[in-house]
Each structure stands twice: as structure tokens, then as C-alpha cells.
Image (cartoon, rainbow, N blue to C red):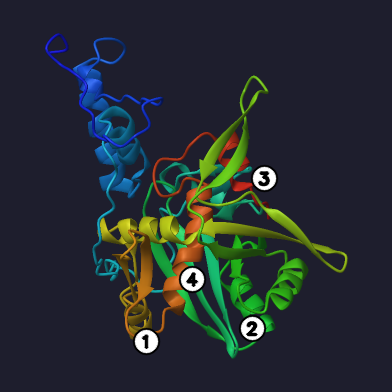
């Protein structure tokens, strides 16, 4: 095949002094075999189908097949699978941090759950409004499945704090949007030991990852390393995240029925979870836009809740504890 092949000029107006070449990996007769490429493509497709992770598929298309990646527009019916449970029910498969180590629920015994230092995979996302706070609490089993534990609206910070304690959420597992009334949010988070978050138009953030040999490499993540801000004498961690990538991940979790809601979930929650759609603008930019003037506060809370889930690798198989902690930007929460 290579013997009879030739390069084809695709840009006849390019400067004669500059030449660029690219070819499909299937043409190469060194390195990866066709079998290797087939396995790589299948694994990339599996990541997309099971976890909503398009990165491997995008890289295979661009780097192996040497063709441009094209985003697709679609509408997702953002209505989570209704599970056979009620809000606040005990979940025997709920994962957690056992002696600081993230552990899937199926591997945790009763004695470990009763340990005062055990911290469940239970996270609270909060959307701040002028008249109060929308909140969502979600539990994870550590292997890609999650349950809605609670959702609602609170009028005051103190009421929000009471809910966090009543629901058994560790302070370090509370994430509050600081896009509105930032100073007030930073102050409250610093006082209660919570985290502040902010959605961003950037798709990637540079992380410095320390390798086992102590070398450091740069990697791209969908969320930033924590930025520490002070409120008086108290510290608050602020995380920035990619709106597009987090919403894509959430939509994929819902699509593959891994992101469930309880039988007695309020209708308002279900309505707000169908408040946005993914579109491509005239200039080719991919965005999530509001559908008419529908409220989207619970949707925003769930998007915020993807931060700890992605950082601790709870949307799929758990990664190495040290690596997960490094990516999360902090040590595992302790009781």
C-alpha cells in the first residue's frame, strides 16, 4: 500500500517554503500494528460509552487517523433513572474513605463503616442565589454508580450547615458556587471548612503531577488545582472547572443510567434537570445553553458535584489512592 501511495496537496496557496505532512497510522509499518490500533479504538469507544470520556476517542481520531475531530450537537433527555430507593435511605453499597483510602462500597465491611474516622462518598453541591441556596447531596459507590440522597432550598447559611451535618456530609465534601456573592461565599466556606467552585469557559487546566520517581510532568484536567483565598484568618480552597466538560460528563452519566434519582424526588428537581441542551454555535463553538427561561439550579448543583466525583475517580474504576489524592488537590477527608 505504501509503495503506491503519494502525498496530495490540500492547500495549494501555502507558502512554498513551508511544507507539512501527515498520514494515517494505518499506513505506517512501524510501531503499532493494525491489531494494536483496533484494540486502542475499541478501548477508546468503551471509555466514551461507559464513562462519557471522549478524550481517548478524540485523540485516536486526531493522532492515529489524522483527521479533524468534529463535535456533534445533541439534546440529552436529562432525566435520571429512577432507582428503587427513597431520599435519605441507607445504601449498603455506598463507598467511602477507609483510613484515608478511597474504597468501593462492596469492599467495605460493617466494622469499617462504624469507625468514627470513616467518611462516606457523599458530596453536597450548592448553587447560591440572591434569596437563598439550592443544594443537592449525592452518594457514590466508588465504581461508577450514584444515588440522589437529598435536594432542596435553604434560606440561610446556618440552615445549610444544619443540613450538611444532618445528612452526614463531611465539611471537605461540600462545594459551593462562588460565581455570585463571592466574598460572602469565601467567608462562609472558610468558616465551615467547605470548598468554593467556579465554572469556567476553559476546557483544560494544567496540573503538575509528581511521578513515583519524583519527576514532575504536566497534564491537562477538566478542573484546576485549588487556589487558596483568605477570609480573615481562615483559608478557603477555590476550584475552577470546565463548564463544557463537566456538563458533558454529567449528561453521559445520566444517559448510561449511572446517575439515578429516588422514587420520591420532587418534580421540581426533574424539571430543572432538563433545563439545558448542548449545541454548536454558528462559529463552531460547543456550548450548553438554557432551554427557554427554565430554572437550572439543581442542574448546576449536580454539575458542581461532578468535581469530587471526577477528582476521586468515582465515575468509573478507582485509580491509585496517591494519584487520586494528588489530582483532588488535598488529602482524603477525615472525620
Which element type, helix, strand or loop, lies under badge 4?
A: helix
Identified at 20% across, 21% down, the residue is 26
The mark closer to the camera, 1 or 4, is 1
User: In terms of sequence position, does the residue under pointer 2 or pointer 1 come before the other?
Assistant: 2
Mark 2 and mark 1: Cα distance apart in space = 28 Å
Identified at 28% across, 71% down, the residue is 79
The quadrant holding residue 35 is: top left
Q: Which residue is mark 4?
A: 301
Q: Which residue is mark 3?
A: 331
> Is residue 180 shown above or below 288?
below
User: In terms of sequence position, does the residue under pointer 1 or pointer 4 come before the other?
Assistant: 1
Q: Are marks 1 and 4 in contact (CB under 8 Å)?
A: no
User: In terms of sequence position, does the residue under pointer 1 or pointer 3 come before the other?
Assistant: 1
Identified at 30% across, 61% down, the residue is 254
Q: Are marks 3 and 2 in contact (CB under 8 Å)?
A: no
Asked if residue 206 can be seen in this view, the reply is: yes
Image coordinates for residue 201, horizontal then vertical, percent: 50, 61
Image coordinates for residue 115, horizontal then vertical, percent: 62, 51
Number of numbered callouts drawn:
4
Image coordinates for residue 293, horizontal then vertical, percent: 37, 86
Q: Which residue is mark 2?
A: 159
Amino acid at each position: 500500500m505504501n509503495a503506491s501511495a503519494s502525498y496530495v496537496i490540500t492547500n495549494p496557496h501555502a507558502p512554498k517554503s513551508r511544507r507539512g505532512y501527515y498520514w494515517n497510522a494505518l499506513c505506517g509499518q512501524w510501531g503499532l500494528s493494525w491489531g494494536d490500533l483496533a484494540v486502542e479504538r475499541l478501548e477508546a469507544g468503551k471509555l466514551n460509552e461507559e464513562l462519557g470520556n471522549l478524550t481517548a476517542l478524540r485523540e485516536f481520531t486526531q493522532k492515529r487517523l489524522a483527521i479533524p475531530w468534529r463535535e456533534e450537537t445533541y439534546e440529552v433527555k436529562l432525566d435520571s433513572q429512577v432507582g428503587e430507593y427513597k431520599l435519605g435511605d441507607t445504601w449498603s453499597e455506598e463507598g467511602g474513605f477507609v483510613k484515608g483510602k478511597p474504597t468501593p462500597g462492596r469492599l467495605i465491611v460493617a466494622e469499617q463503616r462504624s469507625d468514627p474516622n470513616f467518611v462516606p462518598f457523599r458530596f453536597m453541591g450548592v448553587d447560591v442565589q440572591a434569596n437563598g441556596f439550592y443544594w443537592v447531596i449525592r452518594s457514590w459507590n466508588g465504581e461508577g454508580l450514584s444515588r440522589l440522597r437529598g435536594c432542596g432550598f435553604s434560606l440561610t447559611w446556618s440552615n445549610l450547615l444544619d443540613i450538611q451535618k444532618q445528612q452526614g456530609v463531611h465539611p471537605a465534601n461540600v462545594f459551593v458556587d462562588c460565581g455570585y456573592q463571592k466574598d460572602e461565599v469565601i467567608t462562609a466556606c472558610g468558616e465551615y471548612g467547605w470548598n468554593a467552585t467556579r465554572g469556567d469557559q476553559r476546557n483544560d487546566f494544567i496540573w503538575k503531577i509528581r511521578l513515583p520517581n519524583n519527576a514532575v510532568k504536566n497534564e491537562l484536567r477538566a478542573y484546576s488545582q485549588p487556589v487558596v483565598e483568605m477570609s480573615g484568618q481562615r483559608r478557603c480552597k477555590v476550584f475552577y472547572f470546565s463548564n463544557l466538560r463537566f456538563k458533558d460528563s454529567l449528561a453521559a452519566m445520566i444517559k448510561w443510567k449511572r446517575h439515578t434519582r429516588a422514587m420520591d424526588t420532587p418534580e421540581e428537581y426533574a424539571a430543572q434537570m432538563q433545563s439545558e441542551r448542548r449545541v454548536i454555535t454558528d462559529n463552531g463553538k460547543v456550548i450548553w445553553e438554557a432551554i427557554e427561561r427554565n430554572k437550572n439550579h439543581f442542574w448546576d448543583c449536580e454539575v458542581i458535584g461532578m468535581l469530587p466525583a471526577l477528582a476521586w475517580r468515582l465515575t468509573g474504576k478507582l485509580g491509585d489512592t496517591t494519584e487520586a489524592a494528588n489530582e483532588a488537590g488535598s488529602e482524603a477527608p477525615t472525620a
